Amino acid sequence: MPVSYPRFASRDAAALPTHFYNIKADFPSPPPPPLYPATRRPICPEDLAPVFPRGFIAQETSVERFVPIPDPVLEALAIYRPTPLVYASGLRAALDTSAHIFYKYEGVAPLGSHKSNTALMQAYLAAQEGLETLVTETGAGQWGSALAHAGGRFGVRVKVFMVRVSYRQKPGRRTLMEMFGASVAESPSPLTSAGSAYFAADPDHPGSLGIAISEALETALAGPSSRYALGSVLDAVLMHQTVIGLEAETQLHELGLEPDVVIGCVGGGSNFGGLAFPFVRRRLTEGRSIRFVAVEPDACPSLTRGDLRYDHGDTAGLTPLLYMYTLGKDFVPPPIHAGGLRYHGMAPLVSHLAALKLIEAKAYPTGRVFEAARTFFASEGILPAPESAHAVAAAIDEARVAAAEGRSPVILFNLSGHGFLDIAAYASNGREAKMPVPA
Amino acid sequence: MPVSYPRFASRDAAALPTHFYNIKADFPSPPPPPLYPATRRPICPEDLAPVFPRGFIAQETSVERFVPIPDPVLEALAIYRPTPLVYASGLRAALDTSAHIFYKYEGVAPLGSHKSNTALMQAYLAAQEGLETLVTETGAGQWGSALAHAGGRFGVRVKVFMVRVSYRQKPGRRTLMEMFGASVAESPSPLTSAGSAYFAADPDHPGSLGIAISEALETALAGPSSRYALGSVLDAVLMHQTVIGLEAETQLHELGLEPDVVIGCVGGGSNFGGLAFPFVRRRLTEGRSIRFVAVEPDACPSLTRGDLRYDHGDTAGLTPLLYMYTLGKDFVPPPIHAGGLRYHGMAPLVSHLAALKLIEAKAYPTGRVFEAARTFFASEGILPAPESAHAVAAAIDEARVAAAEGRSPVILFNLSGHGFLDIAAYASNGREAKMPVPA
């Protein structure tokens, strides 16, 4: 194995996949199905018809191994894809490690994170069916701004419920969404029955993704031509994100490499799943000995400390019951800066892999995460989003352990977004993730 | 000519140039040389030895047509280069224009602008000579953060004088610089004789690039192992930026195209020169009829309303006399958000092209610039830096005129940086570019 690699594998258009990868085609056993809450029978596509665009439901329930990406979506993805696969030579030198660290950098997307990968697909499907509005929630605002952009591109109105703590920590994200024509409300809000109880009890309630999902879902169901869009958790959303892993596979292959360890942060699970699933396939179908590490904040430890059981995806109990690792739908995480990871549950597909012991899970405290992000920034020059910084921290630890043991593994992690809107968090080293007072 | 193009030309490593292009080799007449202020004789390389690294002086005075990029710099550039050349299909649809608009997107650089192209080269040259410190100034902070990063990469300490109005408008940029280990002072400061008179008269003086250059230069000259680094204006800096235009030339060539109009914003002139010079060469040596448009803010109109004469590059009069369009070294521009364009002069190489009538100059008011940037953001999804938004505005006007005249020109502009740190300016639509009160 060579001692170093070119900083970049090819970013030729040839690396951009034409199909999503659907891991359900390759599972050794199927995951338990979502249940209709009232009857606890498995949901069927018709149950979802009032909630999601029909095309999305078809993707959510598909078991085809490869699902084609429509041309207008491919064209939109090509604005920023294939994203760079970077050999972290600066970080390697800073750590003085024998490990080879690569990262897939999704921060080159227009809104700065991987969320556009599914936002563009979902907005396209809604537009195809002539739907007027998509309603969604957002934590740190990466998903909300990506959907606002996608809605603008395909002519669909977007309404966003933004978790209050992030709304106040990151007012810039709201500006971005509104510049695309989206409307944005603080959650919990007085606008929905799901939010109004929390709002009445405390108008400064920090909120959570679970509550915001309830508000968005309730609002979507109330409109005649509106549907709901979710930025993570669902099978189809994770499938949309597999463009990340499929590209990385091609890019590493060009270097004659495959990863020994694949790492991603997890909130709902989509950027981890998107990078990992194509490599999980190689482990499942070709027996490759690849390890997978999902990294969560210790303030919201669904995979490491939650229960594997049926639970609602939202706080009000409007969603189907999902079989997943969960801290309970009423869990409200502390207001950490990594707002995108403040979710009580975990994608059923990621939960299934954890239950099958195909992936490992680790929980990191904020202090170690920010320390790792600073090391990465100083050596690579790219400021990670606080969410992505969890993956950075685990990658650094893997590299250190490998060096101590005299090994030179290929470590691949997902740098799912940049932190240009999180500089204030870095200025305080993540310590002051308090609820800001209203302006 | 086809009606549309692929969103992206190749981003293959093959498009990354191995040499800078030096336009001085192709000028029909040489530009007037810099003069030593005391004697008004042309400066010679030895005059510059206390100011710049020796390798930089060699590049500054070179008349070779192609100057090689050292391998360690190429490796560092390859972190983000070649940058995307994007076909602006969204903007084209929004404008309903027959013109074909392409932009070179430098915002994918780690610090978010084209400034890393020269920062990495300058830090490398300083490190090669064992210099300990580079001192510089910065306006909006893009140059300062790029040099802080480059210094970190090559092991050179960086000190930055940041223009006060930007220091207070954009505290995040300071955080970024300090995270790389750089030290940052507000300018005018009480630390130098160049700054202390302004500081004593008004500790809230908004500052200017001219004053900050004086402070940096004075500080660099005072240290035994310190030199000065400048982010624009100088011949060598513009030469470093030609990687932008050389890549664009290759990328357009792959599509069988060449531009009819090339557009860039101008403050000191480096991103405009970087994109334009390789195409100016085609006009000079092959007679191609390409137009070039340099766009400046009407609040700092050196090219459109300045005089062409010898003037100092800084306010205190420490630099050699440069023959350039200038508003006078004592001109202090109003505190517009496009801090990177608040410079009283213009690069001698760009000034020379303007004097030869090879390029056109336009001045835009802030309102039109922000309006254009919002149109671009809504249709392309990328938020321009306020500086780059000047180029966006001119590109949109070119496209509108072309459509009205039934023409379909190929318009190429430089999107020199992203605006993720300028969202507050967008929230106020650029109108509240006041001097913030101290925290």
Image: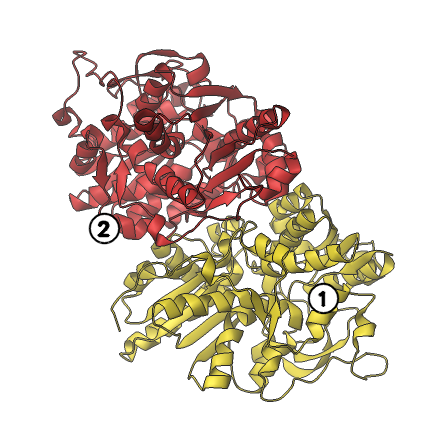
Chain colours: A yellow, B red
Residue depicted at 45% across the width and 12% down the height: B305
Residue type, numbered disc 1: Phe
Q: Secondary structure at mark 2?
A: helix
Give how far across and how far down residue A73 sits, in percent.
62, 57
In the picture, residue B281 is in which quadrant?
A: top left
Which chain hosts label 2?
A: B
Circle 1 or circle 2, nearest the eye: 1
Residue B61: image location, x then y, percent: 19, 28
On screen, residue B19 above or below B211 = below
- Can you give x and y, in whole percent of width and height, for residue A363 in the image? 51, 73
**B291 to B109, vertically: above or below:** above
**Residue A140 seen anywhere in this rendered image of the structure:** no
- Please give left or right for residue A154 compared with residue A385 in the image: right
| Numbered mark located on residue B71 in the image | 2
- Residue A196 position, x and y percent, is 83, 58
Disc 1 is attached to a residue of which chain? A
Whether residue B358 sits left or right of residue A242 in the image: it is left
- Amino acid bearing label 2: Asp
Q: Is residue B249 above or below residue A135?
A: above
Q: Is residue A312 left or right of residue A119?
A: right
Q: Nearer the viewer, residue B248 or B203?
A: B248
**Vertical position of residue B90 compared to residue B437: above or below:** below
Query: Where does label 1 land, which residue?
Result: A56
Q: Residues within 10 Å of mark 2 (few under 14, many from 20)?
A: few
Residue at coordinates 44% horizontally, 19% vertically from top-left?
B360
Answer yes or no: do the residues labelled 1 and 2 have beta carbons within 8 Å?
no
The label number, if any, that marks residue A93 in the structure image: none
Q: Answer yes or no: are tags 1 and 2 on the same subunit.
A: no
| Dot 1 crowding, Cα within 10 Å, few <14, some 14–19, many 20+ | many
The secondary structure type at the circle numbered 1 is helix
Q: Residue at x 47, y 83 (%)?
A: A283
Residue at coordinates 40% horizontally, 30% vertically from top-left? Answer: B272
